Amino acid sequence: MTTKAGSSRMSASDRRTAVVKVALEEFAKGGLNGTATETIAARVGVSQPYLFRLFANKKALFIATAELCFDRIGNLFEQAAEGLSGADATGAMGDAYTGMLVAQPEVLLMQLQLYVASQDPEIRAVVRARWERLEELVRILTGLEPSEVTAFFARGMLCNVIAALELPAERYYSHL
């Protein structure tokens, strides 16, 4: 479908996807309470009322953004572990994740914002469910025992702190 000016119009589904991608960048910087939906709408090129036709409220948009964040990590792990198992799989996933922290810092920052926003019970339920799903995915991909999966996630959280604080990677990553 095109407008009179000849530019193509996005479907509501495509527009939702575009909004969530921009929201991930904005929420990563400002969190749930510090991010203005007006900013997100303006960056996407829609009005704030239209934004709220796509998402019931700011929390719904934040939750959709949480889903995208976890989807990106899960997809990354699946790609990295393809054809591998055990320590080889976790090594490949860890390397890919470290690369993501550098290439897509908004994913790291969004994770941190998700944990802060988990004071809200609805957000906490989503984040908890997605965390557990990600743990299960890693267990399936690697074939590791639950304690080994927990250790993998503990190292990942340490990587998050190292990246967020911009600590010297060579000082820490070689020991992980």
Image: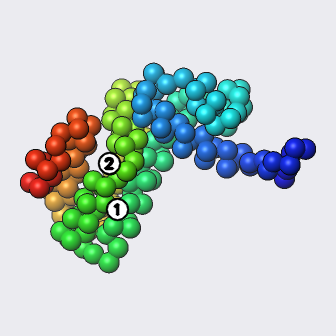
Tell me how the rendering is colored: rainbow
Crowd rating for badge 1 (residues with CA inside 10 Å; few <14, some 14–19, many 20+)? many
Q: Residue furthest bottom?
A: 83
Give the Cα separation between the discs numbered 2 and 1.
Answer: 13 Å
Q: Residue at (79%, 50%) from the top-left corner?
A: 8
Residue 152: x and y in percent read 20, 55
Q: Residue at (45%, 41%) from the top-left corner?
A: 66
Answer with the quarter of the image where residue 37 lies: top right
Crowd rating for badge 2 (residues with CA inside 10 Å; few <14, some 14–19, many 20+)? some
* SS at mark 1 in the image: helix
Instruction: Using the image, tell me which numbered label, if any, was put on residue 34.
Output: none
Comparing 28 with 118, the one in front is 28
> Which of labels 2 and 1 is toward the front?
2
Q: In the rendered structure, are the residues bearing label 2 and label 1 in contact, judged by CB atoms less than 8 Å apart? A: no
Q: Residue at (38%, 60%) from the top-left corner?
A: 76
Residue type indicated by callout 1: Phe
Residue 170: x and y in percent read 14, 50
**Residue that mark 1 sits on:** 77
First in sequence: mark 2 vs mark 1:
1
Q: Is residue 124 visible?
A: no
Instruction: Using the image, tell me which numbered label, if any, was put on residue 101.
Output: 2
Residue type indicated by callout 2: Leu
**How many numbered discs, if any?**
2
Residue 34: x and y in percent read 45, 21
- 2 left or right, relative to 105: right
Residue 148: x and y in percent read 16, 59
Q: Is residue 14 above or below residue 80?
A: above
* SS at mark 2 in the image: helix
Q: Quadrant of the C terminus?
A: bottom left
Q: Residue at (23%, 50%) from the top-left corner?
A: 156
